[in-house]
Amino acid sequence: MTIRTLVKAMACAAVLAAAAPASAQETIRLRIASGHPPVNTYANLMQNFFGPEVTKRVAARTKHKVEFVHGYGGAMVKVADTLEGVQAGIIDIGGFCFCFEPSNLPLHAFQVMLPFGTMDPVTSLKVARAVYDKVPYMSKVFEDKFRQKLIALIADNGYNLGTTMEWNNVADLKGVKLAGAGLNLKWLEFAGAVPVQGSLVEAYQGLQTGVYNGWIMFPSGYVNFKLYEKGKYYTEIGFGAITWHGLTVNSARWAKLPKEVQDIILEVAREYETMTGTVNKENYPKQIAELKAKGAVVRQLPDKVRLDWANSLAKWPAQMAKELDAKGLPGTLVLETALKAAEDNGHKWPVRYNLK
């Protein structure tokens, strides 16, 4: 049975189950899950910080007791089904990448539409927060359309490119099959490479068998999935650290929680959000060092080559803004806000995108 079938079967039951308030004496059990395994920074922090910290603070400051039932790596929901899983009440709290919801959340990948942004995940979070604070739609859509509340944004580490072969110029990648996920495939297409939709589950085999010759990947993924064994060239291009994951809670379950428990969850969620930035930032140099220790050839892309790649993408943000505007979404507003917020936080774009 697929997750979408379960969604239909469980939706009514989930809503009815959430109708009665919890008594002060009963234990509040919350199912928290992600399709990603806890080797991923954000899933690890869900398991080892968010859940335990909420439990501890609720016990210390209220008369209630909270217990979390954790499920990661697809144990409760798959990576592409978490939004629907939270919506149906199959899980109460879910962490997931908006990249898996291009139809439902097309605007939430806005930082991908502005390639060569900041590589600092802490700054990436600040940019994203500026957008979410200025454009109410970004948060409200979860409540209005998907019966859930966005309680935290989640930063990723910076994206680079790992390949099976050495390359020196953008022209060297023309016609080369390179893998990515979702909208970041456009980064490859505009450079003349052949973009291939991939997933981390089959990344090692894909590189091994020649399905593709490289991956757009942050260093943690390259380390954890041992991709350096088949693609030993890792180039720090600096595509940007992207904040396009989130932590959401089912609206009906949320309404059932005591106010003091809600307040603690929101408090810990904001701390969790901050940690996804700081922990990723601390881990990046360690992961680069580990790649080198494992035998990967790690190098930084020369500024001129990076500029050539950025120039190939110069008109794409304006195209995306117009497409989103045409769908009735605040595309131009979001991208303009993100551009300015990045600059306000010290970022200098290799090419200053013009959205007009």
Image (cartoon, grey):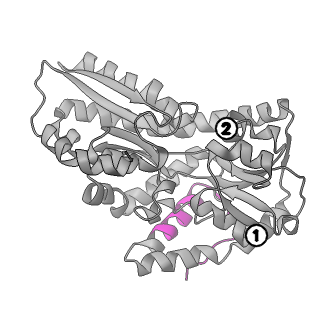
Q: Position of residue 253 (x, y in %)?
A: 22, 39
- The total of numbered circles placed on residues is 2
Marks 2,1: beta carbons within 8 A: no
Left or right side of 84 for 183: right
Q: Tell me where residue 46 appears, x and y as whole percent.
A: 44, 31
The relative height of residue 248 versus residue 287 in the rendered view (above or below) is below
Residue 351 lies in the magenta-colored region: yes
Is residue 82 left or right of 322 when viewed as pictured? left
Q: Is residue 116 above or below residue 120?
A: below
Q: Residues within 10 Å of mark 2 (few under 14, many from 20)?
A: many
Q: Do we see residue 354 in this rendering?
A: yes
Q: Give the Cα distance between marks 2 and 1.
A: 24 Å
Image vertical order of residue 200 relative to residue 213, above or below: above
Q: Is residue 158 above or below residue 61?
A: below
In which quadrant of the rendered view does residue 27 lie? top left
Q: Name the quarter where the C terminus is drawn.
A: bottom right
Find numbered disc 2 in the image and state the secondary structure of the residue it sits on.
Answer: helix
Image disc number at residue 220: 2
282 vs 242, nearest the viewer: 242
Dot 1 corresponds to which residue? 191
Q: Kindly tell me whether residue 148 is visible in this rendering.
A: no
Residue 13 percent coordinates (x, y): 17, 42
**Mark earlier in primary sequence (2, 1):** 1
Identify the amino acid type marked 1: Ala
Q: Residue at x 72, y 54 (%)?
A: 238
The amino acid type of the residue labelled 2 equals Ser
Residue range of the region highlighted in magenta in the rendering: 334-356
Label 1 crowd (10 A; few <14 / some 14-19 / many >=20) = many
Location of the N terminus (image quadrant): top left
